[in-house]
Amino acid sequence: MTGGAVARASAVVFVAAMLQAVIVSSLVIGGGAPDLLLIVVISVGLLRGSIPGAMYGFAAGLVVDLLTLDTLGITSLVLTLAGFWAGRYVETTGRGRRLAPLVAVGVITVLAAAFAYVLHYMLGAEVVARHALVISLAPTLLLNLLLALPVYSLVRASVREPDRLERSPEVEVLV
Amino acid sequence: MTVRRTPTTTLSSRGGGPLRRRLAVGCLVLLSLILITLSFRSGDDGQLSGVHSAGSTVLKPFAVGFERLAQPFRDAYEWTDSLLAARSEAERLRIENRELRQRAIQSEFALQENDYLRALQDYIDGPRFPGDFEPISAEVIGRPAGAFTQAIVIAAGSRNGVRVNDPVVTADGLVGLVTRIAPRTARVQLLTDQGAAVSAVNLPTRAEGIVRHARGTRETLVLDRVRKRDVIKVGDDVVTAGWRASGLSSLYPKGIPIGEVSSVGQTDTDLFQQVQVDPYVDFGSLDAVLVLVPLERPS
């Protein structure tokens, strides 16, 4: 990634982290709130690969944990793995698939919720599994899927850099 | 003639080799685990409290900025939402207003009588709400995500005199308790959090119980541990009990409104009644709160 792309991606992730912590978390619809930050981290992972996905996920989680005075590292760990998985998915099987953002957001939303539940449970939080994994997760999953493609397009427009992947493939004529 | 495409760079090659990839993600996961361990074990005064304080102080202006930016949209949504229910709400409030006027007169009379009797008896009382507290108003600047915690972050901290365990209210009623503190921000555990519990009384009958979060729902409370012989009716007001015994006392002063009883039930097998409480505070749309700072802190 070039310096400009890194700066743009950092700005996008930072704004998403602030929006998530300040506004989006309170937009509870049908018992769950969308996770804009997760979608942005997944999008970065899909667009830039597993290592940048993991790094931006870690940084975004740290910003949220610092701002909300939460136990440091929990959101970072969840988002690090989310960004990494998204990157690995597109590096292996999902590359070139139009619905890759939808599939990644859908699967990773469920996995991230389950992983976060286990983490909180291990740290002694009193969380009802039915509430965390059914009542709250179902609307969150639906909202995340609705937001997946628009957010992915926005992130792609923001972090795009002219590289060989996005240029037309060169064609060599052999006579 | 043969046409051949030159190979393009793949994300796989751009993402580094397998070793580099594993090393990078391994380091980040390890760092996260170290942060969790240190943060979890050290609590509010540990090694990471400085990092927490500095981080939240740096991020606070951004959070306030974003909050201000979102406020007009939030107001517009709430205005539209309230407009839909305005007519029926107005009629309900008119009836309620008549009832409350009657009650206010009776309460004023009882208050005067109570003050007179207290003076007569030299009665020593615990801290009372709101007289023995200085309210500090604070903007809500953050809401942790997920179904795991019900909390808010407010723009007032230790520099404003706020301490851990200070109660937090709005004009409608009890919101929760300060659980973490930074110089300029504080985290408030909402009453709807799984870990929150408040000793409370049913105002008309003085039936005691513990208000806690109803399992499986987001914003419903239950008044737990109410004896079967106590009389509780739908519509009764539930307020904080503010008990004091053997040198210990409730973190909440008595008399803070919590909610209204929405349903009462009991079964033969249960030891206690099942009382559901509809909170007065709308926890989903908290914009500003009051932190009740005691005028005299116990040493």
Image (cartoon, grey):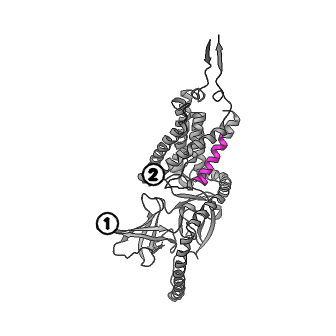
Q: Which residue is mark 1?
A: B270
Residue A127 in which image quadrant: bottom left
Real-space CA distance between mark 1 and mark 2, rounded to the nearest whole angstrom: 26 Å
Q: Taking the image as drawn, is residue B269 in sight?
A: yes
The residue under the point 43% across, 50% down is: A134
What secondary structure is marked by label 1?
A: loop
Visible residue check, residue A73? no
Task: Choose top left, top right, bottom left or bottom right for residue A55.
Answer: top right
- Tell me the residue at 46%/48% (across/down): A117
For the residue pair B102 and B198, the one nearer the viewer reads as B102
Label 1: few (<14), some (14–19) or many (≥20) C-alpha neighbours in 10 Å: few
Question: Disc 2 residue type?
Answer: Ala
- Of residues B234 and A65, the one nearer the viewer is B234
Q: Which residues are magenta?
A: A9-24
The amino acid at mark 1 is: Asp
The image quadrant of residue B80 is bottom right
**To which chain does the residue with label 2 belong?**
A
Relative image position of residue B226 (x, y in whole percent): 38, 71
Depth order, front residue of B265/B129: B265
User: Mark 2 = which residue?
Assistant: A132
Please, what secondary structure does the residue beneath circle 2 have?
helix
